[in-house]
Image: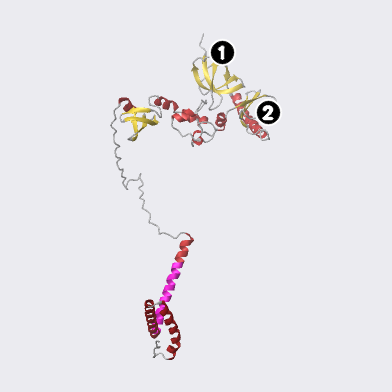
Amino acid sequence: MSETSYIGVQFKPIGKTYNFMLPENLEVERNELVVVNTVRGKQIGRVTAVNLPQPESPSEVQVIERVANEEDLQRKAEISEKEEEVVSAVAKYLLDPGHEGIKVVEAEYSLDYSRLTIYLNYESSTNFNPRNFIRDVSHMFQGCRIEVRQVGPRDAAKALSGIGACGIEKRCCSRFLTEFGSISIKMAKAQDISLTPMEITGICGRLRCCLAYEYEMYDEARKNLPKKKKVINTPLGEGKVLQIMPLKDSVLVDLPEKGRVEFTRTELETGVLEEKTALKDVEDFTFSERDEDVEVVRLESPKPREAKPSGRRDRRSDRSRQSGQSQNVNTRDGQGSSREQNPQNSRGQRQDRNNSQQTRQNQAGQPQEQRKSNSGRRRKSRPQRDQSTNNPPKQE
């Protein structure tokens, strides 16, 4: 009796692989299309693996029916067109009020059109009844059995695809992830990743799948290092662990007198400081201008710009300065011209100024009563001065 062989079949380009049994009189190769019986009816799948070990429950494994022929492939192309029509019709139906938060992801027909499976994405808290939904849309898709399956946000993002949150051309779930594992916030903490929602959340609204890529390596490296906020003995004394650096196999310790010092795991185990090698100076690479493969570009320092007046105040101040200078020039020119024209008038003005200064000095040394009398006398003597300028006024 020949041994039973098992193969792996995949129904979607980036989907889960299911185990199937291969009949004795049938041989298949990888990437070959086969027709199999599933819970959702007959489906066409692609062989991804051969000669697999026996699964845990072999009684539940289905047997492959046959290898897909040209008629099956032609029908599969027709089915894919009808599935797109189902998705557009259901999406139009969900636009009606009362279906907020419900999105259609995809639809799937069986190979004989006997079953139609509609995949919807909605939260469990949403007041959605799948039976009422099937009853409402059954008249649009007659002659088949309709089933509704709820998919999570990760599966919905995988089906829609698109640019990843990190900027990658295609999301990881749509490129190579066939199954979704459990991801927790503990993975982000172990890798010292910022816990801001924008940095650890994907487009699907859940924690990013990439948090699990390096978690095992970080977890294994942390086992040999002391925990955070723990007081440990170092070659320089006791200190408190501030930060763990698993990739460098070292920790950052806060010493009371010396501050923050980094210690490796070997230094903590042996108690001896290691000699740290200095970084080598990088040699300057010079390129010859004659080399055709290298383009030498020289950057010149920009010339300093002149300071420009900013604002209305600077403009007003400049205008006032210019007007003041022009006024001073005009007054000086006028004074010079008047002096040149009337030299006698200027001499008389000088004499009057000297006489007024002498009288002020004389009055400063006299008492207040005498000043009043002198002022009265001056007022009386003014008309005499006008009549006879040669005779000075008499004093009493």
Percent position (x, y) of residue 312? 49, 61
How is the structure coloured here? secondary structure
Percent position (x, y) of residue 31? 52, 24
In front: 266, or 75? 266
In front: 354, or 85? 354
Percent position (x, y) of residue 263? 34, 30
Give the vertical position of 90 relative to 344 (above or below): above
Instruction: Say which amino acid is labelled 2.
Output: Phe
Classed neighbour count for the residue bearing mark 2: other residues with Cα under 10 Å, few (<14), some (14–19), many (≥20): some
Percent position (x, y) of residue 367? 39, 77
Label annotation for residue 133: 2
Which of the 4 image quarters holds residue 357?
A: bottom left
Res. 206 visible in picture: yes
Q: Quadrant of the C terminus?
A: bottom left
- What residue would you read off at disc 1? 59
Instruction: Say which amino acid is labelled 1.
Output: Ser
Q: Residue at 42% across / 78% down in the picture?
A: 369
Give the vertical position of 141 relative to 375 (above or below): above
Magenta-drawn stretch contains 166: no
- Mark 2 or 1, closer to the camera: 2
Mark 2 or mark 1: which comes first in sequence?
A: 1
Q: Residue at 45% across / 70% down in the picture?
A: 323
Magenta-drawn stretch contains 336: yes
Q: Extreme top residue here?
A: 1
Extent of the magenta region: 320-342
Judged from the image, the secondary structure of the residue bearing numbered disc 1 is helix
